[in-house]
Image (cartoon, helix red, strand yellow):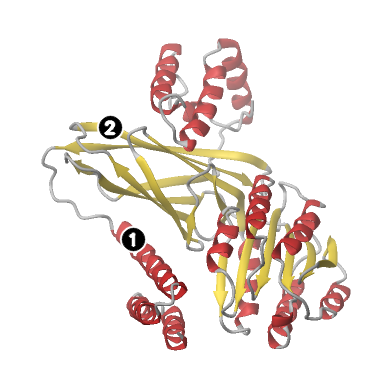
Amino acid sequence: MDPKQDLYAILGVPQDATIEDIKQAYRLAARRFHPDVNPSPGAALQFRDIAAAYEILSDPTARAAYDLERKRLGHIEPYFSMRVTPSRRVLPVLDEPQILYLLADVVPLRQPSKAQVKLNLALVIDRSTSMQGTRLDRVKAAAHQIIDNLSENDILSIVAFADRAEVIVEATRVSDKRTLKAAISTMQAGGGTEILQGLIRGLSELHRHLSSEYVNHLILLTDGRTYGDEADCILLAEAASEDGIAISAMGIGEEWNDKFLDKLASVTGGYSAYINSPGAVSRFLNDRVRSLGSAYAERMRLSIAPNADVILESAFKLTPYPMPLPVDTQPIPLGTLEYNRPLTYLIQLQMPPDMKPGFRSVVRLDVTGDILHEKVEGYKVVSDLSIEVAEDPPPEEPPLSIIDALGKLTLYRMQEKAEEALRKGNIAEATRRLETLATRLLAAGEETLAHAAMAEARRV
């Protein structure tokens, strides 16, 4: 029993709830989320927490002990909050399914600690033959910059791989920076590309100092496709996520498998990016490490428990880095919550036909994370959304935040369709879609991305 967890909020009752209130809340939750009535993996996950909270709060002795521990802690200020905005406040009664979007912002609520975030970082670098020359030189220079920006409290390991992997720098505190840089400079290009070998060695180094007090992160840099081991890489990433390790991936050039790298990152709450210019390597790596150094909470996870008649269609992370979220298994890794920007995601739900007028519950969202400086693990916030259904609702404009989010999602899907056309060999279709994407990006003020899209269209 962790007194920092608000069991009353998990069960959805006030702190002065009577025993009958507590039993009634549990019965309602069971009718919505019990695995016998709701097949959603998020529902099963959340019902487990609800049942654990009920077990304590329904027992007068256990509840008194829990309340006493909460009282000893004094007033507990929340660490982060979650604000959920639906695309519509009132849904019409229809004889067909309808879509409801939810935009959720997770925001830190405390000031940054003076203590520096500690990183447990592994760089896993492709040194295959195709990396020879400018690409590998830029990666080495970027790694040198990262070392300059790390502190003695940080832990760094560097793995180089081709068809085999070797540890260039064993996991160690960043104290002798000159020696670390010298070790990086010895990397030579040669061989094929087997990402699995690099991931195995990189994760092994991270496990040497694996701790909830660190941001445990692996950054993969590659310019090619791995051969025959993609499924094993994904399984390894899923296991890493269970251990609290996130993976970010960067594809350099034009030969990488974007869907593979996207999935590799998304199943851990990491980030994937693709660049054509070797000169952008330093910018990506330094931005990524700077972002990790701004961590307020780590190992953020989301579970989505829709009502049994509501279908969870998709989820998409908008900030800090846009990326589709896997919804087939839960909890869904969200990665890092930074001090200086919210963690925002968009959920698409399919509401059932022939809903009855009145207020009805829709979905329960549960976000947990480890608060690094406070050494609080598994801090949880819950939002249980209800919505009104009416025969003839008044006209309603969607919130501007939802419109903006859907615009970003549309741009992402346009890029996906262009890539799909290219994979199918439909050059004209891919070019048209990339040009349209560039126009939309330019209109949205994203000039750099627009120029990149146009350059890709010309290359295709």
Please report the residue visible at 74 percent of the width from the left and 81 percent of the height from the top: 129
Please report the residue visible at 68 percent of the width from the left and 83 percent of the height from the top: 135
Image location of residue 360, percent across then percent down: 28, 32
Q: Nearer the viewer, residue 81 or 444?
A: 444
Image location of residue 143, percent across then percent down: 74, 75
- Quadrant of res 356: top left
For the residue labelled by badge 1, is the local secondary structure a helix, a strand or a loop? helix
Taking the image as shown, residue 176 lies to the left or right of residue 375, namely: right
**Dot 2 alpha-carbon crowd within 10 angstroms: few under 14, some 14 to 19, many 20 or more:** some
**Which amino acid type is marked by label 1?**
Leu
Residue 360, numbered circle: 2
Q: Is residue 69 above or below residue 396?
A: above
**Which amino acid type is marked by label 2?**
Arg
- Quadrant of res 145: bottom right
Q: Which residue is mark 1?
A: 406
Q: Residue furthest left?
A: 392
How many marks the image carries: the answer is 2
- Quadrant of res 443: bottom left
Taking the image as shown, residue 106 lies to the left or right of residue 363, namely: right
- Is residue 412 in sight in this rendering? yes
Q: Nearer the viewer, residue 338 or 417?
A: 417
Please report the residue visible at 68 percent of the width from the left and 52 percent of the height from the top: 236
